[in-house]
Amino acid sequence: MAVLKCKMCGGDIEAAPNQTYGTCDHCGSTMTLPKAADEQITNLYNRANHFRRQNDFDRAVSAYENILNIDASSAEAHWGLVLSKFGIEYVEDPQSRERIPTCHRVQNESILTDTDYLSALENAEDAYTKNLYESEAKRIADIQKSILTISAQEKPYDVFICYKETTDGGSRTKDSSMAQDVYYQLTNEGYKVFFARITLEDKLGQEYEPYIFAALNSAKVMVVIGTKQEHFNATWVKNEWSRYLALSKNDRSRLLIPCYSDMDAYDLPEELSMLQSQDMTKIGFIQDLIRGIKKVLSAAAEKPVSHSQGNVDVSYMTPGVTQLLDRVSLFLEDGDFESAAEYCDRILDLEPRNSQTYFYKLLVQLKLRSPEEIILNAKSLNEYPDYQKAVRFANDSYKAILEDYNRRVEVRIENERIEGIYQQGLLKMQTALTETEYLEVASVFENLGAYKDSGDKADSCRALANEKRLIREREKEEARLKVEERQRLEQEFTDTMNSLRDRIKELETINMKLNIFQRGKKAEIEKELIELYERIRQTRKQYGKDF
């Protein structure tokens, strides 16, 4: 029997050779399991899982890819790749003790469309295992949407400073102090700079990933600062610069500048050693750095953007198509959608795979005069065939523009959906009367995550629900005591009346046996009987029975 490590907590799970899912005895999580045919495969999975749980996602990706080189149909290896690519770490909820996924490497593309996720579903051993993949991916997709929603509201950054903040002992690193000096120099130059120590100081207690993601995706320059080789390779430092390198591959206008001190340039990580680095001990370092950054940012600011072409590379276009596209752009500006549609058809007769034309056809269909207006569209652009063709035939730079339009549409729709739920929650909170109703509203706010003050609203609803519960319990206890008191009084009344009636019956029996010569005794009995009947009347009155 193979011993596999829990993907959530690292505890041991004993699994039979053909077992496809199991529950961890340590944390109670139910999860999918790999087919551990032998000890070698088991060790490979445990090694890859170890890297991911240590948040060393790049090494985890490599480890899972090695498994796929051995078995390309391994659903669990594909799923491990998904968790590593999206930087999934499972943390324990202090209240429920449930292991909750957190996302450290969010991406614009949904996890539900990821190729490795689809491969995991395709190669799942059975329906239950497939359902486990689907339910977990849905949880991660919801987290991803929440992060993207928050990040979309962030203003773009010019520069991202990447560095190690604290030593293993918890003290501040020299890297942090040097990075802060660079931060102040760059902000004095008027640049918007992401520096975690300052940028995230008002985000205490919140998830940092939405803000890191927004900064990584918007910054044109990343400055990586380090004084030791291990600082450059520290998990979270590498997580940031490796993600930025990946973004740079699709956007050549981005620049990553390694800056080192108290170490040799040859000790930089291999991925960074290929880049032009800066020695921070050199005289004039900061001036050289600012000059390089200014050059990149100035080039980005001055880059011409044609409204009609939308940054499309027109060098390959058929002669005359550029002019026709300009005409379409003008027709759209004038709201002459019929002529715009006609010219789009003429362009497609010349170039059936012209991406820009399909996007213009979409604008015609939606009766929009400019591309920016599409941001207000009511549904995802992926639902339109013309948009799909525009993306399909676009070059890398134009494809990025089109996908950004759709991302902004989907983010806006998601924002509106969440705001709608938030407003409904506020209305229900105002009209709630019972504990159950307040708990239902609390659940609504909790599902919104970090949106606005949803957390505070959820806490308020739970507090109000608790008040209603206490009132209900107090009223229930008071009602119980009233019933008990009523029953006690009823029993007391019954006992008293029975005692009086028994005495009356006893006296009447004695009285009947007395002869005429026992007048004195008879008089005594009759007097007592009168007193007893009066006590009966008074008792009825006392207990409210005088009717």
Image: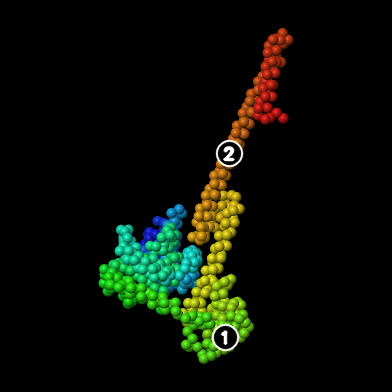
- Name the residue rendered at 54%, 52% in the picture: 461
Q: Residues within 10 Å of mark 1 (few under 14, many from 20)?
A: some
- Name the residue rendered at 47%, 68% in the picture: 155
Quadrant in the picture for the C terminus: top right
Camera-side mark, 2 or 1: 1
**Mark 2 secondary-structure assignment:** helix
Say what amino acid the circle numbered 1 marks: Arg
Frontmost residue, 5 versus 451: 451
Q: Earlier in the sequence, mark 2 or mark 1?
A: 1
Q: Residues within 10 Å of mark 2 (few under 14, many from 20)?
A: few
Residue under numbered circle 1:
327
- Name the residue rendered at 55%, 60% in the picture: 422
Residue under numbered circle 2:
478
Q: Position of residue 281 (x, y in %)?
A: 27, 70
**Above or below — where is 194 with respect to 394?**
above
Which colour scheme appears in the figure? Answer: rainbow
Q: Position of residue 309 (x, y in %)?
A: 51, 82
Horizontal arrangement in the rendering, residue 298 relative to residue 538 (left or right) = left
Say what amino acid the circle numbered 2 marks: Glu
**Mark pair 2, 1: CA separation:** 82 Å
Quadrant of the image occupied by residue 347: bottom right
**Above or below — where is 396 with respect to 445?**
below
Quadrant of the image occupied by residue 202: bottom left
